[in-house]
Amino acid sequence: MFAYGFMRNAFLASTFIAITCGTVGVYVVARNFSFLAHTLSEIGFAGAAFAVWLGIGPLWGMLLFTLLGSIGVGELSLHSEQKESSISAISALFTGLGVLFLAVSGANSNYATNILFGSIIGVDHQGVMQLVILSIIVLLLIFSIQRQLNFDSFDHIGALAHGVKTNFISVIFLIALAMSVSIGAQIVGSLLVFILLTLPPATANYLGKTIPAMIAWSVFFALIGVWLGLYLGYITNLPVTFFIAVFEVAVYLVTYFTHIIKHKL
């Protein structure tokens, strides 16, 4: 399997993507941003389609749209009384824009499918290096504010009382989240990127007693999911995303029901 260059590229890129999404996802779940992550994935779809229309790489369009969208949607989710309805409206708008950009660009159905559901095995060496660099940038952003981010995410009231600049921390985190959505979409697609950003950390919440432990468990399950997905996709010629989704859902459900049973005994 590793005799093929595209599989080596796929495993390298997916490893960094899993580490990034697994780490950022812990804070997505802690801050109740799962719905926001889903919305950003649809904004990313519109960005990728816009990039196709312009004739540039979809990744750059996704980055542009998610970075701009994360700040606006993030602020809306914090301050709007009807935040779910407002974000749903924005999500619907950008989904429609994505369809429009694909239509006017004349992209074929295969290209649209790759944007929606990912195509990591089609990423060349240059694309892999771009994903690795972006992943490292995201991790550096998170680790540079981790102490304040931990405080704000797990004890927001306490963070305010201790003078933590929560608005600044939120903006930095939203930028990291936007970049995570863009790079994570390269393996599971824009519509399913929230799988890696929510399910591994949700599972980790039941297993980790500390924040470092939760991050470790989240990254572990994200890595196993993408590695297993790539391997099974290679031997069966079925979509990698399918196997990743099934694995992450299965692990979450097993962990959840095990937790429930233990607390009932």
Image: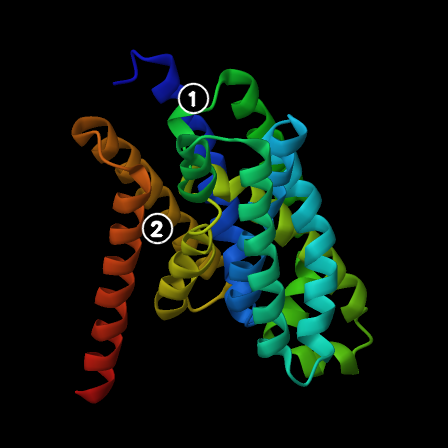
Q: Earlier in the sequence, mark 1 or mark 2?
A: 1
Q: Is residue 150 left or right of residue 22?
A: right
Residue 256 drawn at (x, y percent): 27, 72
Camera-nearest residue between 36 and 48:
48
Which of 178/80 is in front?
80
Q: Examine the image and state in which quarter residue 122 appears.
A: top left
Crowd class of label 1 (few under 14; some 14 to 19; many from 20; radius 10 Å): many
Report if residue 9 is visible in the image: yes
Q: Label 1, label 2: how many angstroms apart (C-alpha)? A: 20 Å
Q: Amino acid at mark 1?
A: Asn
Q: Is residue 261 above or below residue 184?
A: below
Q: Residue at x 21, y 29 (%)?
A: 237
Q: Secondary structure at mark 2?
A: helix
Against 161, is 206 above or below? Answer: above
Q: Identify residue for label 2.
A: 221
Label 1: state its secondary structure.
helix
Tell me if residue 11 can be seen. Answer: no
Q: Position of residue 199 (x, y in %)?
A: 38, 60
Give the crowd class for mark 2: few <14, some 14-19, many >=20 residues within 10 Å. Answer: many
Is label 1 or label 2 in front?
1
Q: Position of residue 213 (x, y in %)?
A: 44, 59
Q: Please, what is the three-letter code of the amino acid marked with disc 2?
A: Phe
Q: Which residue is mark 1?
A: 9
Q: Which mark is residue 78?
A: none
